């Protein structure tokens, strides 16, 4: 499944991921307070379509009553699953008492989960980390609390909050959580290649895997995961024509979502990810980064892909 990625996993990105076999995708993290206040910008995060099902909606907050009210709004908006974020380590989230800091207060965490579960008939999952720090690993405790409060599944990213995204994810924590509860456990962290998904499931016994950063510029990773047992690790990669086709499809969906002018800015990061690792990609990123509008960017993109197609003959030049 596709992880909730702040500033990334919008409707356009989710639909592209689903086109490669991603069966369940999540919105980016949404403020419960924003939903309850009827903030237009917050409500925009709930935008979906018939091609975007089933949809998990991740909410964050520190007040059980507000989280319950937000859950009702999600259900009324057409969401299919609610995920409670108790793993985000970002300062602006943590300072509100939300995200990973809730792992410091298991009692409050339990109250939040229980209130959200009672507020809706939708399945409720909880996304956690290993703990707040290496001295306070309590993922098993939080998972048991979540199970008792009525959670349908646990999603575990086995890094501590103070680790951020540095170092390696400790998959053994996933195995420990799996042994601690009877509800399904979804593993997350360091799924960068299709083979990583298989390795995680074998090593931990988890019921499913969630892909985050491994999907950036690489939505075909879901195709690779689905085909991994039969075809091996490298057959899922696209050729140049498919890669360019998906970039253009993603761009058009982003433009539909935000308008072409704003999408010209929001889509730049995706272009950098889509071309990462290709020949002379650093020069392309430098050139594209100086472009002022979408037309100029896509002119450079076409020029760059023509270079890639012809580079094997030695006749191409890209400067």
Image (cartoon, grey):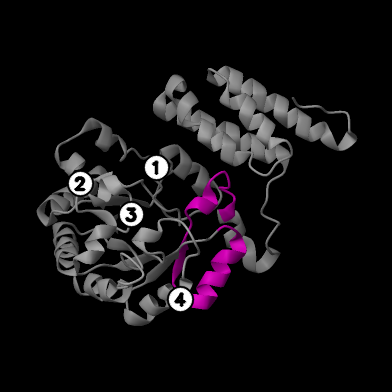
Q: Nearer the viewer, residue 83 or 249?
A: 83
Magenta span = 192-221
Query: Does label 1 or label 4 sit earlier along the sequence?
Result: 1
Element type where label 2 sits in the image? helix
Disc 1 versus disc 4: distance between alpha carbons? 38 Å
Q: Which residue is mark 1?
A: 50
CA gap between label 3 and label 4 equals 21 Å
Q: CA distance from mark 2 to mark 4?
A: 32 Å
Residue projecting furthest to the bottom: 179
Q: What residue is shown with label 4?
A: 172
Q: Answer above or below: position of 202 versus 250.
A: below
**Label 2 belongs to which residue?**
32
Foreground: disc 3 or disc 4: 3
User: Residue 117's spot in the image, x, y percent?
Assistant: 18, 62
Answer whether labels 2 and 4 touch (C-beta < 8 Å).
Answer: no
Q: Nearer the viewer, residue 74 or 28?
A: 28
Say if 42 sits above or below 129 in the image.
above
Residue 197 part of the magenta segment: yes
Using the image, determine if residue 216 lies above or below residue 103. above
The mark that comes first in sequence, 2 or 4, is: 2
Residue at label 3?
89
Question: Which residue is found at the position 71% from the left and 56% from the top?
Answer: 235
Q: Is residue 26 visible?
A: yes
**Mark earlier in primary sequence (1, 3):** 1
Residue at 77% x, 34% y is 308
Q: Earlier in the sequence, mark 1 or mark 2?
A: 2
């Amino acid at each position: 499944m596709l992880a909730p990625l702040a500033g990334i996993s919008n409707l356009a990105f989710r639909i592209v991921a689903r086109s490669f076999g991603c069966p369940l995708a999540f919105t980016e993290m949404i403020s419960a307070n924003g939903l309850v206040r009827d903030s237009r910008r917050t409500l925009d995060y709930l935008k979906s379509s018939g091609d975007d099902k089933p949809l998990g909606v991740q909410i964050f907050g520190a007040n059980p009553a507000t989280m319950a009210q937000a859950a009702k709004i999600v259900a009324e908006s057409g969401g299919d699953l609610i995920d409670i974020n108790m793993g985000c380590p970002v300062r602006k989230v943590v300072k509100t008492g939300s995200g990973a800091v809730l792992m410091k207060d298991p009692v409050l965490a339990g109250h939040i989960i229980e209130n959200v579960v009672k507020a809706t008939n939708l399945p409720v999952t909880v996304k956690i980390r290993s703990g707040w720090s290496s001295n306070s690993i309590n993922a098993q405790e939080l998972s048991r609390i979540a199970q008792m409060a009525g959670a349908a599944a646990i999603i575990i990213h086995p890094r501590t909050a103070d680790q951020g995204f540095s170092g390696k994810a400790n998959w053994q924590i996933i195995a420990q959580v799996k042994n601690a509860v009877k509800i399904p456990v979804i593993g997350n962290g360091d799924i960068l290649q299709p083979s990583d998904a298989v390795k995680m499931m074998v090593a931990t016994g988890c019921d499913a895997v969630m892909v985050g950063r491994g999907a950036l510029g690489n939505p075909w990773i879901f195709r690779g995961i689905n085909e991994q047992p039969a075809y091996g690790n490298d057959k899922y990669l696209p050729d140049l024509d498919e890669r360019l086709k998906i970039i253009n499809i993603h761009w058009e969906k982003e433009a539909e979502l935000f308008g072409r002018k704003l999408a010209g800015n929001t889509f730049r990061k995706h272009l950098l990810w889509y071309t990462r690792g290709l020949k002379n990609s650093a020069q392309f990123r430098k050139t594209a980064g100086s472009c002022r509008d979408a037309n100029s960017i896509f002119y450079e993109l076409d020029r760059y892909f023509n270079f890639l197609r012809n580079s094997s003959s030695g006749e191409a030049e890209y400067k």
